[in-house]
Amino acid sequence: MTFRARHLLGIEHLHPVEITTVLDLADSYVDLNRGARKHGDALAGLTQINMFFENSTRTQASFELAGKRLGADVMNMSMQASSIKKGETLIDTAMTLNAMHPDLLVVRHPQSGAVNLLAEKVNCAVLNAGDGRHEHPTQALLDALTIRRAKGRLHRLTVAICGDIAHSRVARSNILLLGKMESRIRLIGPPTLIPAGAQDWGVEVFDDMKAGLEGADVVMMLRLQKERMDGGFIPSEREYYHRFGLDAEKLAHAREDAIVMHPGPMNRGVEIDGTLADDINRSVIQEQVEMGVAVRMAAMDLLARNLVADNAAGVMA
Ligand code: NCD
């Protein structure tokens, strides 16, 4: 197995072989999670702290479950109630926690780059659970695992990523990962929600759903990130749904066996039709959630192996 990273801050610095290593190990954790007894011991004796400075349902729950299933002592910091509210800086909080000798720190933060900064200050392995509009690496890895299990491969697939690309860390991490694994990527959305310079990323850009979905193997829908918008990016939600919301009629332009994805939380009737989202013949949205636990188990397992090896080398040196 090849996985050299000390932290999981983004897809940007991962090698394709490292990505495959995470996905292969995650496949074995899917089997464990489907069994009656779901316990491994890869993180036994290690301490995992989850620090979420932004709301989260599935990411936080799945990191917690992943740590517990592998035997870690898991602590969820309530950041609403923490000293950050009293004016302590992110770095002060991190240094305080660092003094308690955690092994894995899982961090979500509204500012792009905050998690990288934090990783420079602490001794443990840091996992980025989403920083601003920058990266969300475990989401891209769980999406890749879902696609690989449905399609049997990641290369030479046509993947359409649709909607609010400009504000989405999910889109950014997916574009990086799918590009490294040699998929063809299409971005579809209104020009106001496509970042300037996207044409230079080795992707095709469309502002028409039907044209963009033509022949796609995978259709990945994104939530409108209203909390990151500071003005009118769309005329109205109704108009947006009409032009960019995924329904059966638009999906008919993709391949007959195309799968539909969404990272959640979903706005039914804004970016996706509710019935289509629940259609188990097309939608893999629940599989994405299942793969999320397995991928986070694999990522923390691999980081812990490197951490333990480093510590052992340090003790011997
Ligand atoms: C995403 C996020 O937080 O970036 N959600 C998630 O992690 N499941 C996408 C979103 O919030 O729209």
Image: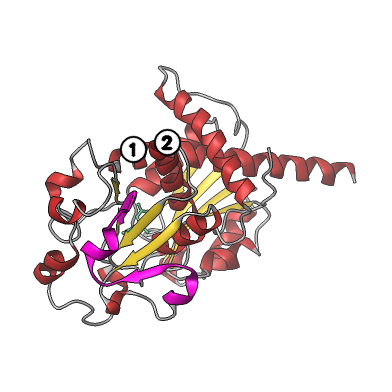
Q: Residue furthest top?
A: 36
Determine the residue positioned at 46% across, 61% down: 175
When the figure is inspected, residue 215 is found, relative to residue 194, above or below; the finding is above
When the figure is inspected, residue 186 is found, relative to residue 47, above or below; the finding is below
The x, y position of residue 213, in whole percent, is 27, 58
Q: Which residue is mark 1?
A: 287
Q: Residue furthest right?
A: 317
Q: Which residue is mark 2?
A: 149
The x, y position of residue 21, in whole percent, is 60, 40
Tell me the quarter of the picture where residue 302 sits.
top right
When the figure is inspected, residue 96 is found, relative to residue 206, above or below; the finding is above
- Quadrant where the N terminus sits is top right
Determine the residue positioned at 34% across, 58% down: 160
The x, y position of residue 73, in whole percent, is 54, 36
Q: Are marks 1 and 2 in contact (CB under 8 Å)?
A: yes
**Most foreground residue, 184 or 62:** 184
